[in-house]
Amino acid sequence: LRLGEPPFMRTMYLAYWLVIAGGLAASIVIGLTGQ
Amino acid sequence: VRRFLRENSLTVFFLVIFLLTLTAQSQASWRAYVDDQHAHNQPADPYSSYLVSADFSAKVMENWQSEFLQFSLYILATIWLIQKGSSESKQEHEAGLQTDEEQRVGRHASSESPRWAQIGSWRTTVYSNSLLIAMTTIFLLSWLAQSINGWDQYNADQHEHGQAEVSWTTYLHEPDFWDATLQNWQSEFLAVGTMAIFSVYLRQRGSPESKPVGAPHAETGAN
């Protein structure tokens, strides 16, 4: 954490990345394995 | 926990309603699919299988791509384009990428600035565009995912009707793909343009998306 950055400020940022990356990866795998 | 919620309430709220509506969408979508299968006297997959089907996946990605395109374009267009009087716009003299001093990069950065803003070289260039890079990458990947899942479904349909399957590149030229794509784009573009011009004349007290209620119509920018 950087100086002055409140704890957990990065938690939501990482949560959003996780949801988006998970969704994209799952969807691409579903599409490709369906063929 | 209370402090965490207080400091992150906006993103927590949207993440929660995203997960709730995605779940509700999957339920409604599955029921519609089951009804359709029954109407054709076909067996229907259970909910758990439908969740990982190309049908559901394509529907989700179709909407994702248009939302991320909307924000990517908005971030990009508002660098140079202006709407006088809009809370969403910069003022005329601020148009463009602005100076290093205004943007507090390189030797104009402070010790509190992000490290990649201070450092110079390619890292500062990348960091200077990181929001647009991230949103555009998500747009392109979700559009790719939409196309792969749409292709999957299209071929399943072709197969069912005794017609030849098509390649992915052929599918990209099919009206089916562009119908699913453009029906989402048009609505995003209308909503964005509406927001830019409505914020000139209309107000929402307390919202950072609006000018202060008493601000003159010609006053540009939220601050």
Image (tube, coloured by chain):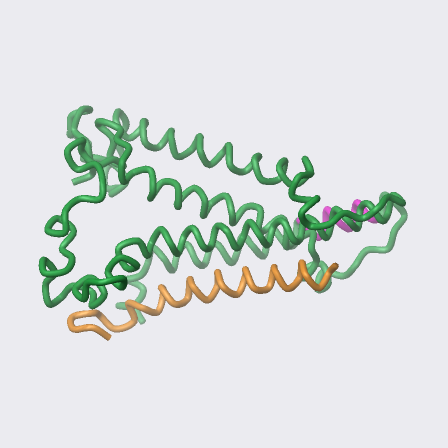
Chain colours: A orange, B green
Horizontal arrangement in the rendering, residue B214 relative to residue B167 (left or right): left
B190 or B127: nearer the viewer: B127
The answer to which quarter of the image holds residue B3 is bottom left
- In the image, B66: left or right of B86? right
Picture residue at 72% right of the left edge, 53% below the top: B152
Q: Please name whichever residue, B214 or B85, is drawn nearer the observer in this view of the structure.
A: B85
Across and down, in percent, residue B42 comes to 88, 51
| Rendered-image quadrant of the N terminus of chain A | bottom left
Q: Residue at x 16, y 70 (%)?
A: A4
Q: Is residue B55 left or right of residue B2?
A: right
Between residue B215 and residue B181, name the one nearer to us.
B181
Span shown in magenta: B29-37
Q: Name, please, the residue furthest toward the bottom.
A: A1
Provide the major secondary structure of the magenta segment. Answer: helix
Query: Is residue B208 inside the magenta stretch?
Result: no
**Which residue lies at the image location 43% right of the left edge and 58% below the top edge?**
B15
Is residue B170 positioned above or below B22 on the image? Answer: above
Image position, residue B109 (x, y; %) = 12, 60
